[in-house]
Amino acid sequence: MKIVSKIVISVVFILILGCSKESFDEGGSGTIKGRVVRDGTFESLANVKISSNPNTSIVFTDSTGNFTMQNIPVGTYSFQAQKEGYVARFESGTILVNEVIEIVFELKPEEKVNEPPTTPVLKTPTDNSVDLPLNVTLTWSATDPESDPLQYTLTLRNDKDNSIVTISDLKESSYNLTNLKYSTKYYWQIAVSDGVNPSVLSAVGSFRTLDFPNARFLFTRRIEGNNVIFTANESGQELQITSSTSNCYRPKRNLQINRIAFIKSVGGQEHIFTMKPDGSDVLKITNSVPIAGFNMDHVTFSWSGNGSQIIYPYFDKLYRINADGSGLVQLYQADSGKFISECDWSNDNSLIALKTNDINGYNAEIIILDSAGNYSSTILTGVVGAVGGLHFSVNNQKLIYTMDNSGYQSPDYRQLDNCIYLYNFLTGLSTQLNVAKPAGTNDYDVRFSPNESELIFMNTSNDGISTRYIQKVSLTVNNSRTTLYTNGFMPDWK
């Protein structure tokens, strides 16, 4: 029995050894051979780094693009081929015991990254240049790392309106601007493109043109739904001095301080501002008490002769304010049911003329106050129809105004035969002037010329929709009329 047991044990031990030997052999290794070529041309690539994941060993291709990796443990791997200037490539493979597998890598060259052009540098005119002519040559510079051909786009805007001019497909680094506006600040910017990368923008440069010459006239023009102020000279040249995006009107210049006062809409109210003759240095004058009346198309204000103060109406009250916005004082209050619509302050500041009316603009009166706001006299009352356009002569002996001879009254304040009248303080009489007004038209906003030999005013058809003309008429030579500017109103002449 003992002998049989020993034989059985020996057989079992031999079987165990046999099984262990077979398991060790199955964990052996294999070999991978391969070649690396250039994609498309199949050119052999030398010195390509070959590695595996999981990591076993690293080899490099020879001059023929071939490689061999030996003694790789059995298993599945991801093999990678890497070479500078080429996109890395991965291939998978399974290693078997004592087997040789083959892999071919096709590497694509990396595309060279195209660099964008340099930021354009604005060269001329230098930033913030002033007093430039109306023809200006812009120059700039930019380069491209790959010497790609460059194209430029010029963007130009100004401080007078909301227009933006874009000039594209420029191949030279310069451009001639022509027919620029006087007294205008321009802003310019260059975008450069190499046709590959997004455009590169320069900084924004600026320059200012020459001041507008001999600008003695002011008027308002309607543009894109807003009132816009223009200055002009006797040669017929015009210059817009307020933005088309703001509602600005009723300009009046004071020569003593060389500033223009005007009305501007702000947040649902109308306020008085001042500015330099070129439209710069804008200053808000009124604050807590805006300018207001029954119809803002027919509401005016007035400078003092020395330009230190302004008077203006707020419904039934007349206020005086300093030209810097300080010192607001109420000078006068109209009778119950009356609004103050227009005012004019004599050159020596001794007299103030007021036009008052009811809520519909009628039952008008023209009254005279002293400088302190005390009532002095009434020069027009008891008339039917519209009245307006007050302006003192320089010596206070005359007052010019308009009145609708038709006596027509309507809810829309339409006027049918608005004529020019002259009141003489020495005689106490008003006289209608024969100024050759065409039938069916109205004259509005009449003012004396600086030398008082002429009148300036706006004339238009009484239909209320036709073109408006700024005209002047001589008081001494055949009462001849001359049209100065078309599509304008609320004139001023200094």
Image (cartoon, rainbow, N blue to C red):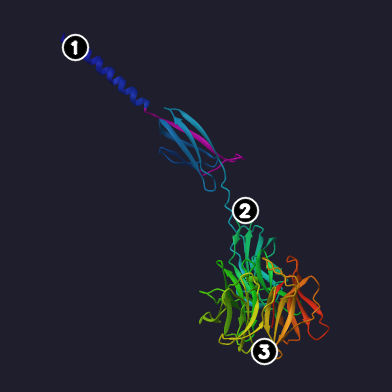
Q: Which residue in the protein does label 3 denote?
A: 396
Residue 46 part of the magenta segment? yes
Mark 3 vs mark 2, CA separation in Å? 74 Å
- Classify 356 as above or below 266: below
Question: Of discs 1 and 3, which sits in the foreground?
Answer: 3
Across and down, in percent, residue 301 comes to: 61, 78
Range covered by the magenta-colored residues: 27-48
Give SS at disc 2.
Answer: loop
- Classify 461 as above or below 89: below
Q: Amino acid at mark 1?
A: Ser
Residue 301 part of the magenta segment? no
Q: Give residue 424's mark.
A: none
Q: Which residue in the protein does label 1 denote?
A: 5
Q: Which residue in the protein does label 2 denote?
A: 196
The residue positioned farthest toward the top in the image shown? 1
Q: Earlier in the sequence, mark 1 or mark 2?
A: 1
Across and down, in percent, residue 137 comes to: 69, 71
Across and down, in percent, residue 323 comes to: 56, 82
Question: Of discs 1 and 2, which sits in the foreground?
Answer: 2
- Identify which residue, 80 or 168, lies in the foreground: 168
Pointer 1: residues within 10 angstroms few (<14), some, or many (20+)? few
Q: Amino acid at mark 3?
A: Asn
Q: Looking at the image, which residue is at 67% across and 58% down?
A: 149
Residue 449 visible in the displayed image: no
Across and down, in percent, residue 241 comes to: 65, 73
Left or right? Give the position of 43 relative to 76. right
Give SS at disc 3.
Answer: loop
Q: Amino acid at mark 2?
A: Val
